[in-house]
Amino acid sequence: MFKTKLIYKFLITFLIFSIALILPLSFSLRKDMKGMFTNLEVLIEKGKLNDARAIEDKFFKEIFTHLMSISFYAFFLAFILSIFFSRRFLKPVKALYNGAEAVKGGNLDTEIPVFSADELGEVTMIFNEMLTNLRAKTEELQNKDTYVKTMMDALWVVDTNDIVIDINPAFTKIFGYERSQVVGSSIYDFFDTENAMVMKKELDLKRHRGEHSTYEINITAQDGSQIPVLITGAPIVRDGEVVGKIGIIKDFREQAKLVKELKESRDYLETIMNSIEDSILIINNDYRILKANVAARTRYGNNITEKKCHEITHNSSRPCWMEGEDCPIQGVFTNGGTWRTIHEHYDEGGNKCYVEVIASPIRNSEGKVVEALEIMRDVTERVRHMDEISRRNRELILLNSIASIINQSIKAEEIFSSVLDRLMEALDMDGGCVFLIDDKSRTLRCSCHRGVSEQCTSTAIRIKLGDDIPGRVAVTGEVMTSSNLSSDNRISKSLFKDTKIKGYCCVPVKGKERVLGVYCLFKFKEHFFTIEEERLLEAVGEMTGLALENTRLYDEMKEMFEIQKSRRLQEQRDLLELSSKLTSARDMDEVIHCTSSLIKEFLAADAILFWEKRDSNTLALRYSDGMQPQTDTLKMDEPSTETYAAAKGTYINIHDINTDARFLFEELKSMGLRSILSMPVIVGENVLGVFTAMARTSRGYRDDEIHFLRIISSIFGVALERSQLYEKRRIDRGLAEAILNTMSEGVCTVDTKGVIVSANRSAERILGIQANNLVGRNYSEIFNAPAEGDACPIVKSLKGEKASAEFIQQKGKGEVIHVSSLPLMDSANRICGAVQVFRDVTSEREIDRMKTDIIRSVSHEFRTPLSAIVGLTEMLIDGDIESERARKYLLTIYEEGMRLSEMVSELLSISKIESGKETIKLSNIDFSELIESVKSVLDAPVTKKNISLFTEIDTERQEFYGDREKLRQLLLNLLDNAIKYSDPGCYINLRVRYSDKYVILEVSDTGWGIPENDMANLSKRFYRGTHGERTKGTGLGLALCKDIVRIHHGRIDIKSRLTKGTTVIVTLPYRRLNDA
Amino acid sequence: MMPKVMVIDDEPFILMMIEDKLRRGGLEVVTLRESKGAVDVIRREMPDLIILDWMMPEISGINICKTIKTDPDLANIPVFMLTAKGQEDDEKLGIKCGVDRYITKPFSPRILLELVLEQLGNK
């Protein structure tokens, strides 16, 4: 771009100036010159100027004048132009000047305007650019200054002589020194001697290298305290030359504290880790050990760090998981949880050991598992113990199962078979057999076997004692084992040698004192029997041996028990038989005979005697069998076994009378008897007699025999005493019973519990129960509670009161029984029961009831006719009735009076029939005539109720004798009932039929019918039934009918359905005239 | 207007006797020999007092009484039970069924009239 250079401006200015000045001057000069020259010529011609001098003078004069005017003009022009141009040049210069002044005053924000595009303009622009740069720089510097000032860390700047040039405010803040105190001082003034040396050394070392350096040091603060700091120093290099240093001083107090704490905690952790006896490893995910505690180092070597964990623990180049073990480290890194396992490890010496490993994750701040902490505890001992325990446990289980087999079974075969199975299972054997010693043949007999062929056992079925291995073991009682039978030199010959059996063991089955048999166990592979196994087998052998002995003992015991049992049973049977005979027997001689025979049989005696004690001084012979003594009485002072036993109250047994000198046995000896036993029969303290049993052999008696004999004699004694008492009482009671049984009242006694003790014949009769069914039962089973709800008189009597009540016997026909009861007193005046006297008062009560019924009914039925009589009479008397009506009144009184009379007659008829006073007046009955007579009476009600009454009489009439009046009454009553208990317009049918044996009168109606619950009571006197509410009547009609039929030896049947009607069928047998 | 007494009994002489006595006592008397349909007659006649026999064919007096006493239109009519049933229990049952006066047969027509008048007077 073309720029108007200042030179061009000057040139143009000069050109303008020149043109404006030279051109007019030249023109005016030429014109003037020309004029002058013209004048000169003229002068010359005129010769005025002859003189050259004059002409020259003139010329110069003229030029001068001209030049003078031109100069003046030129100056003027120059002045105008200079003013114009100087203004143009001065404006930018002035602006520049002002700008420079402003910058000098510190104002960097000035912007100088550019007025022209010339050099001045450019200078102005450059100046402006300069200002912009300066501003940026200044800003940058200011920022840097701010940073320095606001730095948290202290900062100092030192020169090459280590004199502090500058510090930042943080320095003052941290160390307390003011800037003025620091600037100009040597840096060494701020350190104590020791730190100053460190500082110096540090600076000297790093200075010549011109390097950065960081070091920890203590600076002495103004208050004298040592402040730990971290100084980062850097050289200040200018033009390739170090001119000073700048040091950033970090207050390291907090960090120092933290570092200290960290160190402490690390130490602490390390101490803890090292004090733990378990090995602790910290392992990274590459299975590399980062850290190990002392225990781990002791166990696995000092240089384990950086090795891989499986190398040191498993002696393997591969992690344990690759070898099929649970790797807890792998678990921690894959799943993050805590893992626990027991590993087989190898210690430094290469010994196998068991280690319990617990691995837990170590996480970084992000929660990521970065390392694993593995704690390893040597549990070798524990594992070994556990193995031992589990082995023992297995043994115990085995022994226990064997014990339970032994406990559950009492069969030797079963026990050995099961035990063999268990042993084979427990010791992992292929087979085995059990041999038991047969004492008779001195051989071993195979009891059971497993895993060997039948053939083998059949040849081995009998092994002589001392032969082969089992035979030897049976003799020595020592266990024999062989890990390989075929190559065992100890055994030269054996049944088992040729088999494929290799591992072999033979164990004795030991009883308490001797060997009872052997166990053999074998395996088709080689098997080394450990000492534990041998011991176990030995124990099993002993256990089963004892069990075998026990089973044998049990069998023996069982046999013995069976014998004893059958013996006891026999004894019991004998006793029971005796006891039942004693209780049932009334005849004492029979009792004595039974007992004596039993004793004789039981003791297998040859003779038996029973001596009864007559009085305190005499024994009388009551029974003898097998021998007959010469005397039948013995005085108590005579010396004999009987008197001895009676006097002492104890038995005496002489095994052999030939060797006994106490008693005289001449008579017995002569009979060939040798032993004697006398047993007293004692009840309470009384001796009632003596049994003597004798045998032809010498013998004593066992305790149980004596015991049995004692029991028999006791039972017998009781029976004997009872029989004596019974005899006495029988006579006493005879009289009392005779009196009681002749009484008409029932007499019955109860004990204090209310149990009936006795009842007389009248009691049997009244109660309808046999005396033997009464005695022993509780009175409450026989007598019901009294009707009035009173306490039973027996209850009262048992409390000492006298009482009476009436019972209704519900089990019988409802008889009413009157009971009076009195307490029974014993000799000590205590209540020992009650006696009750009772009578059957049923008929009395029935009569009472009938009386009441009749009175009630009569009074009721009589009321209506009486109303007429009383009421109408009263009105007549009162004069209420006019004379023409009085007749009607009187007629009614008469009719009702007659009705009363009729009722009285009916009642009388019944009472006559019932009392048996009424006699039957027989006549030949013509039912047609009889019915017509009845119908005429009933005409009025039949017409009134519009009833259709039909009669039907068999035409083939037969001769029938009966009481005409009573039969008329019967038909009248039956028809009256049919009319009375029917609705108007009903049908009544009366039918008379003659059959072979009977005349049948049948009255049927279509009336109301009889409710079912009334049927049972229909013929009771005064019973009116449900329909009685609606009808009038005496309730005597049907009762009278029943009585009439009864005296004709007939029967009456009533069939009825409610709302349908009733049929009454009277069946009367034919009777002859002279039948009374 | 004369008070109206209704007498229901199956014995004609009782009806005759009571009718005569009450008429003499200045009362209007309606007699009925049958218990069947008696309640309808009562509804129609609306007597001031009813004399009932207990034991009648068809419907017993006590059931008629019960019907009257449970019918709100008739319950206010006094009922005299004139019966041969003289037991105490019978009387109790009668009173329980709403009988206003229980009179046992035989009875005095004079006293009956007095009782009827007294009952009507009270009303």
Image: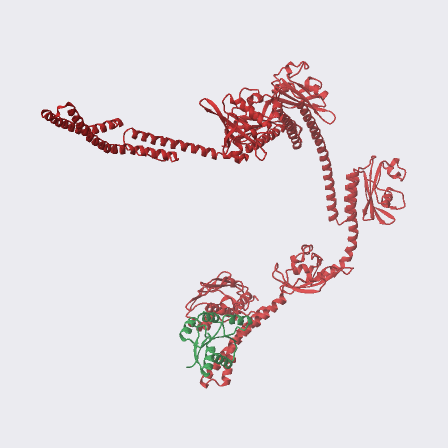
Question: If the image is split into quadrants, where does the C terminus of chain A sit?
Answer: bottom right
**Which quadrant of the structure image shows residue A787?**
bottom right
- Whether residue A320 is visible here, answered yes or no, is no
Residue in view at x 23 percent, y 27 percent: A11
- The colour mode here is by chain
Spot occupied by residue A101 in the image (x, y as percentages of width and height): 36, 34
Spot occupied by residue B41 in the image (x, y as percentages of width and height): 41, 73
Q: Which chain is green?
A: B
Question: If the image is split into quadrants, where does the N terminus of chain A sit?
Answer: top left
Residue in view at x 45 percent, y 80 percent: B19
In the rendered picture of this protein, how many numbered marks are placed on residues? Answer: 0
- Whether residue A920 is visible here, answered yes or no, is yes
Residue at the farthest left position: A45
Spot occupied by residue A930 in the image (x, y as percentages of width and height): 48, 70
**Which quadrant of the structure image shows residue A638?**
top right
Picture layout, residue A744 above or below residue A82: below
In the picture provided, is A557 more to the left or to the right than A91? right
Out of B19 and A629, give the one closest to the viewer: B19
Picture layout, residue A1049 above or below residue A621: below
Picture layout, residue A837 above or below residue A213: below
> What hue does chain A carry in this figure?
red
Out of A505 and A6, give the one closest to the viewer: A6
